[in-house]
Image: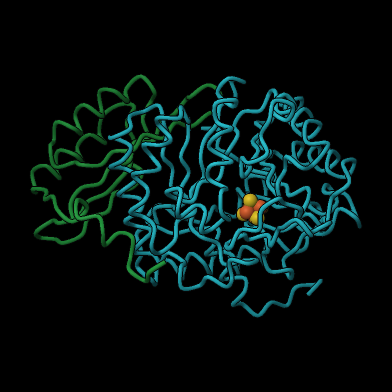
Amino acid sequence: MTSERGSDKLQHLKKAEISESQLDRLAGFANEEGIELVDWLVRGIPAVDWLEGSFHVRPNAVGDLINRLVAEGAVRQIVVFPYGIPAVDLVEVRFASGR
Amino acid sequence: MDSARVLQVHPLGRCNLSCLHCYSSSGPAVTEELETGLLLGAIQDAAQEGYNVLAVSGGEPLLYRELSQLIECARNLGMTATVTTNGTLLNARRLKSLRGLDLLAISLDGTPDSHDRMRGRGSFLQMARRLEQVRAAGLPFGFIFTLTMQNLSELEWIARFALDQGAALLQVHPLELAGRGRQMSEHRPDEEELQWAVVEAARLQTVVGPSVVIHVDALPAGGLRDIGDCEYQSLPFAFLLHPLIIESDGTVVPAEHGFDRRWKLGSLYDRSLAVSIQQFRAERLGAFRKQIVAGALTDAAAAGVRFVNWHEALTRRAREVAVSAPNA
Ligand code: SF4
């Protein structure tokens, strides 16, 4: 093994930008029924270069939320994590954007 | 939301492999093995206290003859049952004994070369050639990847492998500096690498789609909080301390295998799990919360990190703190 970081080899992680208006829209999703913003971290104010967060969503609202996150374009990474075994009753949707 | 409150059980220390990073220092020469009766009693006690997942690990749990009894016991109590294995010993007979299992978690440490470097020559092939039988048995299965400082770039290979093999889960678990893993401190992923792992996992999730859930054992630091005093009084024990670990010598500890013995709840050989929990709750949970949980939260906030390997943070904090615990 070398002492180089594994992430140093992942150049695709080191790009992407997000605008202030996109940021506002993403935060705005949280005001909607059935969607709870549980975590929200921004770095680089005023020029935002990193954003990550997570929503808790009812299972039937997940598809719609993901479509809208994807439509934002700058959101490059989304992970969906279902809770409740065997019946999923809540889904966490995490997203990240930027360097 | 019904969160996972895990009772992690290590019924034996024996293993057919001797991996470089093994946090339980398992291997072929280790003989420690827990009596089945003690374990069955502990699983029942744990269910009473609100634990809803039994996670059997090792050593190699497939070498524990009464493994199916543990699984059956947990399932009868309404718990989810999972087994973590190196996968090399899976055969038709053993797969049959795993019937009813909710998840078989198979260790996978990177590309075949990397995996063999950690686990011994030929271990990747031995594991991979068993996967067809696992699929045929209809067992839900996933892979557990030990993240080091150097191997995040292999996660994509693993994610695609998991997808091709029909796995349901890919869990990314940061290297634990316990057991033989203690010799590998320069390979421990730091907080920055952990953060990149979360982002890379999220990216790969979109690559492999929803059939393989990629999960990183890291919590968003911004979401961490201690629960209030009232909740502490009223909640079942499992909500206050999980995972709870039973090691192969019968010792019960919080959070991680090898957790500082000053915070052990007891030993199954001395008293039942129910009694250990009762005593810990009455006499030491408050101190644990103050010295370890609150301390780890402060450490995380001071470090300004985005993601925390929470169980490791507790373990580290417990090592650092000078404790005046009753059974110190
Ligand atoms: S890491 Fe797992 S497979 Fe390797 S020696 Fe330890 S118990 Fe055995």
Task: Spot the residue most to the front.
Answer: B122
**As rendered, which of B7 and B104 lies closer to the eye?**
B104
Seen at 68% across and 46% down, the residue is: B57
User: Would you place residue A20 above or below residue B131 in this image?
Assistant: below
User: Would you place residue B308 above or below residue B82 in this image?
Assistant: below
Seen at 56% across and 26% down, the residue is: B140
| Residue B304: quarter of image | bottom left
Q: Position of residue B319 (x, y in %)?
A: 62, 74
Relative side of A44 to A52, left or right:
left
Seen at 75% across and 73% down, the residue is: B325
**As rendered, which of B45 and B69 lies closer to the eye?**
B69
Q: Position of residue B211 (x, y in %)?
A: 40, 26
User: Would you place residue B116 above or below residue B98 in this image?
Assistant: below
| Residue A78: quarter of image | top left
User: Would you place residue B130 above or below residue B18 in this image?
Assistant: above
Q: Position of residue B142 (x, y in %)?
A: 52, 35
Q: Quadrant of the C terminus of chain B?
A: bottom right
**As rendered, which of A39 and B57 lies closer to the eye?**
B57
Relative side of B269 to B100, left or right:
right
- The tint of chain B in the picture is cyan
Q: How many marks?
A: 0
Seen at 71% across and 50% down, the residue is: B16
Q: Chain drawn green, letter?
A: A
